[in-house]
Structure formats: C-alpha cells, structure tokens
Amino acid sequence: MTELSFTCTGVRADRYAAGPTLVFRLRITAADAARVHALALRCQLRIEPARRGYAPEEAAALTDLFGERSRWGSTLHPLQFAEVSLVVPGFTGETEVDLPVPCTYDMEVAASRYFHALRDGEVPLLLLFSGTVFAGPGGFRVAPVPWDKEAPFRMPVAVWREMTETHFPGCGWVRLPRETLDALLAFRSRRALPSWEATVEELLAASERTPMAVGERTAP
C-alpha cells in the first residue's frame, strides 16, 4: 500500500468565487517517491477551540456556544467546519493542490458564530483525510486512505474576515423562517421604510420605547 502524508501549507480567500470560499493549499507526499495515478480525496475540517486563548470580548461572544468561561474545561469541544471532496491528478513522489472549501456566513451555524466572535489571531483547525488512492508502478492498485491521516493548521482570522468582507461588505447574514420574513415585509410596507436595515432599526427603537415583560411578544 502506498503511504501518503498530508501537510496544509496555506490558505487564501477566493475573491472571484460565486460565494464565500476559502482555498487551502495541500502538499501530498507519497513515501519512497511512489507513483500515484489518481487520488479520490475526502477532507473533513474541524475547529479545535481549546488550542487557542481568548480575549474577554471574544469569550463573551462565545457564551452561546460554550457557556460561561468557568465551564470551558468541559464544554470547549471541537466544531465541525466543512467536509469536501477533491480528485487529485496523478503524481510521483509529491504534489501540491488547492482544496476549495465553500463557506457560509449563516449565523445559525456554529462554525460561523465561532469565526465571527474572534477579533484577531488564528483559528486552530484539524484537517482529517480519507478516500481512495490508485497507485502502483505497473498498473493500478486500489487502496483506502487510512482514517488516521490528518494535518493541523492555524488559519489567520484575517483570511476569514477578508472572505466575508468580499461577499458581505460591512454586513452580516441572518436566516429567518418564511413566516417571519413575511411579517417583516408587511411591517416594512406599512411603515414605508426604505430598507431592511431601517426596518430592523425601527423595531429595535420600538422595543426600547416599550420594554417587554418576560415572555411577552409583540406582533409587527
């Protein structure tokens, strides 16, 4: 069986992708300069939050994910970030390839909330590999990529922010149920508000003028 090793050497934001996309650079090495005809690769990317420190402001923003800081010893568990596939062309000995990873800025997704909470520094990631390797000097031999193949990588927070600013400049993104959107649209139409930003600001101002009791809800 051809022994493979994986290293992540860098990451960049794809400024020309149709949607938010990070591109990780992978170096793949075959032991003994072996010939690999093709590699059907799967990669799971996981956030390892316990492998970095957090400023007080970051810790406050992460409360909804991990609870109060005093509990982080038992709650700071890994977060699933993405899972992607890639077909690597044939190579001998070593090759480098780009691994595109489509991303979301949906704040209902735990990974997005985690990234959004960070102000600077790096995101500790672990890339876990599996798949199928087609190798052999005199024909094809098919073997699985062992499940223990992995590569740690520390992604600069600035790269994530560059990606989100490219596609959502100065904005965030919130997913709402259709019924809520319809109610917001009706409220906006009744008030003749010029934008969604103005609509939300009007609702926030109204809530400050009339504080709600616990459990009370107001209809638009």
Image (cartoon, grey):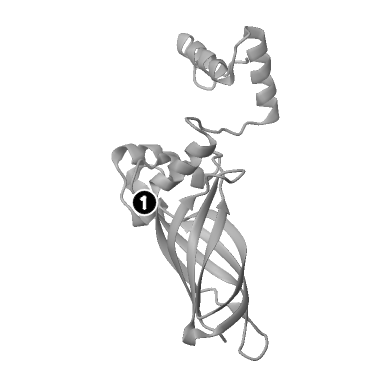
Reply above or below: 25 against 28.
above
Residue 78: give x, y in percent of width and height. 46, 56
Number of numbered discs visible in the structure rendering = 1
- The answer to whether 202 appears left or right of 153 in the picture is right
Question: Type of residue at label 1?
Answer: Glu
Percent x, y for residue 75? Answer: 41, 51
* Pointer 1 residue: 122
Residue nearest the viewer, comparing 212 with 193: 193
Q: Where the C terminus falls, by quadrant?
A: top right
Vertical position of residue 24 compared to residue 181: above or below: below
Q: Position of residue 42 (x, y in %)?
A: 60, 66
Residue at 49%, 32% in the rendered image: 169
Q: Which one is in front, 29 or 52? A: 29
Which type of secondary structure does the marked residue at label 1 adopt?
A: strand
> How dense is the environment of label 1, judged by Cα within 10 Å: few (below 14), some, or many (20 and up)?
some
Q: Position of residue 162 (x, y in %)?
A: 45, 42
Residue 23 in the image: above or below residue 220: below
* 191, above or below 143, in the image: above
Q: Residue furthest bottom?
A: 138
Nearest the viewer among 83 and 7 is: 7
> What residue is drawn where x is 58% and y is 20%?
196
Quadrant in the picture for residue 89:
bottom right
Specify the quadrant of the image occupied by residue 147.
Answer: bottom right
Quarter of the image with the N terminus is bottom right
